[in-house]
Image: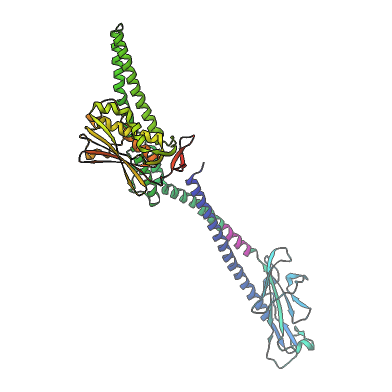
Amino acid sequence: MNSIRRQLTLSLLIGSVVVLGVAGVILHGSVGDALVDQFDVGMHARARALGALVEREGIYVEFNYSEETLPEYAGGDDPSYFTLWLADLPDAMTSPTLAGVAFERHSGPTDAPAFWDLDLPDGRPGRAIGIDLPVVLEDDDDDDDEDGEGALLDSATAAQADLHVTVLVAASREKLDEQLAALGGGLLFAGATALLLLLLGVTLAVRRGLKPIDRLAKAVAAVDATSLSTRVGSDGVPEELRAFTVTLDELFERLEASFAKERRMTAAMAHELRTPIAELRTASDVARTWPDDDAMVDEVVATAGDVAQRMGDSIESLMRYCRLEAGQARPEIEDVALHALLDECWKPYAELADERGVRFLNEVGADAVVASDRGLLGVVFGNLLHNAASFASGGVIVAAVDQEHRSVTVVVANHSDDLEAGDLEHISEPFWRKDHARSDGRHSGLGLTLVSSIAAVLGHRASFKLEDGCFSVSIRFDPAAPAVPEPSENGHSRQLSARP
């Protein structure tokens, strides 16, 4: 399972290991080079000291070497070695420790001597220096070798004004290797200790840094359907999480509104069904009281059928509304003649309107045609006219067309003494009703809600207006209707063209 904590800790540790490794390599290289340079400086001094012991007196060269003054070349526990070549002569002078073993001649000038590693005659690892040094010329008028310890130069060598000697000095590098090993071990120990401290520090730092996420997770986990009013808030929240908490609070707000809407719909539907259920119970009680009264039984059956019809209409309206809200109803677009459709939609409610002293005046022209779904548009106008026939305060229900440029707007208006301006913001809510004006039990309370929902699905716009006691509903048909949804098998919708 992916874990931000684990990935962050691992990334920081890997990065730390890389940084420490690179730093350790650089430090080991620089300090190691300094130790080697220091060792080479000592070797260089020893070679120059040996070169200074070679003196020239005319045609003689003397090497003033003494085992008492330079005992390391005589033997002991840590012997050193030297070899001297005079000019280009093949013969060499060697230290007693070499015991006849010859080194290969290799050297460099005074300012750039040659250094290299080698195995010493006794098998130890060693390091050598080869350097060309000028021979010291003594100021002596006598060309004789007074003590007889010098070497007689041949005429060609004696003729060289700048006679030089090649000095090769070799010594054990065991102590140098021990220092380098100690340096490497120290760096490894320091690196391991630093990694342990980093592991502890990174773990604590990551845990502390992710605490706001843990607190946020606990706060979200505590939210359920009964506590959707909870808000996470952005106080004390790190900048990186602030946008997330704001979005989360907006989600909770939408969920709270949605759940509240569902609760209102459930409560209103229960209230809507309670009246017809009570009527059915009363009718059944009457039928059981007078089972032999055929006329009474017929009336009870008729009442039950009427109640069942109204219950079915309520449930069908609710299902229709839910399908439209979920995008599960697909509009079928065609050219619809508005005048004929309005007359057709008015017929079921003409008798109701006559009983209430309300009449319908269809002023929509016969040439008014729009592109829409005839069946769904019939539901829109049917609900509008049913609402007007049921709740108009009397007089005339007028349907007219307001045509501007290429858009068409159908307006259905009637007088209403019950509505107020503040009711307009609730009038299209599911099951909303104006107390006494809409409590006769014959309506589902979904009429104007369906008007708004279906109009939106069809790409039309429904608006409500109350002015001087006249309530009007406008349905606007734009020439370039927006896309409408096509239902899919899983209940989600995708977009289709508004026109065939």
> Which of the 4 image quadrants contains residue 141?
bottom right
Specify whether 310 is left or right of 358: right
* Residue 374 visible in the displayed image: yes
The percent coordinates of residue 161 (x first, y second) are 72, 89
State the residue in front, 11 or 188. 11
User: Residue at image x 73%, y 90%?
Assistant: 58
The percent coordinates of residue 97 (x first, y second) are 73, 70
State the residue in front, 13 or 71. 13
SS assignment for the magenta stretch, majority: helix
**What colour scheme does the image use?**
rainbow
User: Residue at image x 74%, y 70%?
Assistant: 98
Stretch in magenta: 176-185
The percent coordinates of residue 171 (x first, y second) are 67, 69
Count of picture labels:
0
Relative to 188, say whether 163 is above or below: below
Specify whether 28 is left or right of 117: left
Specify whether 445 is left or right of 12: left
Report the residue that reaches farthest toward the front. 366
> Which of the 4 image quadrants contains residue 482?
top left
